[in-house]
Amino acid sequence: MKNLIAPIVLTLALVIHHSSFAQDGFKPLFNGNDLSGWDGNSELWSVIDGCIVGKTTGPEQLAYNQFLIWRGGVVKNFELRAMVKQDGNNTGIQYRSRELPEVGKWSVGGYQCDIHPTPANNAMVYGEKAGGILVQNGQSMIIDPDGMQWLVAKHAPVAVDVAQWHEYRIIAQGNHIVHKIDGKTTIELRDFDEKTRSREGVLAFQIHRGPAMTVQIKDVMLKELPDGGFSAFDKATLPEGTIPLDKQKGKPKLNEKPKGEGKGKGEGKGKAKQQPKVETPAKKTAAPEKASASVVPADRMKWLWSDSPSPNEVAEVNVADIESRKASPTSLMPVGLVNTMNPSELMDLTAYILSAGDRKHRMFRP
């Protein structure tokens, strides 16, 4: 009887679990037994112990990122919940995305809820073949109709061990998108750029080319939300302190002041954040070598500190206190990523570096 009771208890628990979600309008997208309703490379995806498992063996296995695509329809306004853990490299959940047959079979591009060991990147909004990093963990962002990013608010990133089970939640209602880990909000995005945003598209899970990785997924639940929710952009309603960012670089835009900041020294509201002390023989303070970006108002600079406990935390430095500026000796590119790039991607990267990210540079001219 003992061997019979255990499976019955487990089955009842699963029935109760899914029934509670069904009462809230959720439906399961994975049956726990096989990949019915899903489409992907059978060499990469399988079902083991009631979980979807995606696995790669190393950098030479894949020429591009591949995806396990849900074939039950497209997602528009929705809430998705899934339990995920991954080891090695990174993975993600695509939504409102499109298939890219020109890249290869099972290639997908669009909004992605990234699942990444780096806290700032975990549960961020990444544009897979659609703009790169859009909003990082710990940020609330607005993208205006011209594609400019506006940093509305920030908080400490929600930090978890991605090698353990966590619930990832995506809520998309019109142009308002929210990501959560274990119920804690990681990002909030309002996307007003009609040229690049997506209203609907496929749902998929990612296998990332490069270093060997394993991702496990279970309890995939989807709830459809009412249509609508696409509001109009009004710059006048941006909160005070909103910072304009360069969408292509993810940096504060040069020669722009935060909304509501005064033109003269000391006119902006609130006090500037105190900077880390730098030991120098001179009275003036050297600009931080690890600053990853800057904005240049009339009398001070703003920096995004790469070594801050809170990634992308904006700090202020008075121009009068800066003795020198040095480029960071540390690359933000993950170790080994270059080795996974194909010739075309290496050419794009080289052009980007030589042009300093300027799309009008001659490097990008046909």
Image: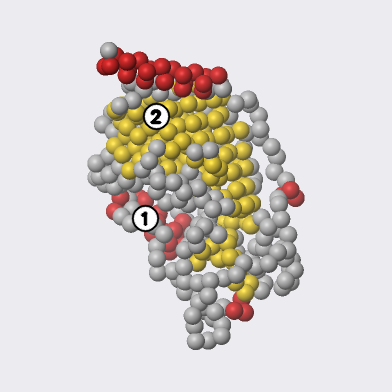
At label 2, the amino acid type is: Lys
Which residue is painted at 48% across and 52% down in the image?
120
Q: Nearer the viewer, residue 320 or 307?
A: 307
Q: Secondary structure at mark 1?
A: loop
Q: Whole-Å distance between the Cαs marked 1 and 2?
A: 28 Å
* Residue 105 at least partly seen: no
Relative to 348, does residue 287 appear above or below in the rendering?
below
Foreground mark, 1 or 2, reads: 2
Which residue is painted at 44% across and 46% down in the image?
160
Q: How many marks?
A: 2
Q: Nearer the viewer, residue 181 or 195?
A: 181
Q: Quadrant of residue 227?
A: top right
Q: Residue 237 placed where, x, y %?
A: 74, 48
Q: Residue 7 placed where, x, y %?
A: 32, 17
Position of 104 with respect to 58 (left or right) is right
Q: Nearer the viewer, residue 87 or 68?
A: 87
Relative to 356, does residue 265 appear above or below in the rendering?
below
Which residue is painted at 50% across and 72% down in the image?
288
Relative to 346, does residue 37 appear above or below in the rendering?
above
Q: Are marks 1 and 2 in contact (CB under 8 Å)?
A: no
Q: Residues within 10 Å of mark 2 (few under 14, many from 20)?
A: many
The disc, 1 or 2, on the residue closer to the chain's N-terminal end is 2
List the single residue furthest toward the front: 1
* Residue that carries the numbered disc 2 in the rendered image: 218
Which residue is painted at 35% across and 15% down in the image?
8
* Residue that carries the numbered disc 1 in the rendered image: 334
Q: Residue 195 placed where, x, y %?
A: 58, 41
At label 1, the amino acid type is: Pro
- Label disc, if present, on residue 14 of the rendered structure: none
* Residue 257 at least partly seen: yes
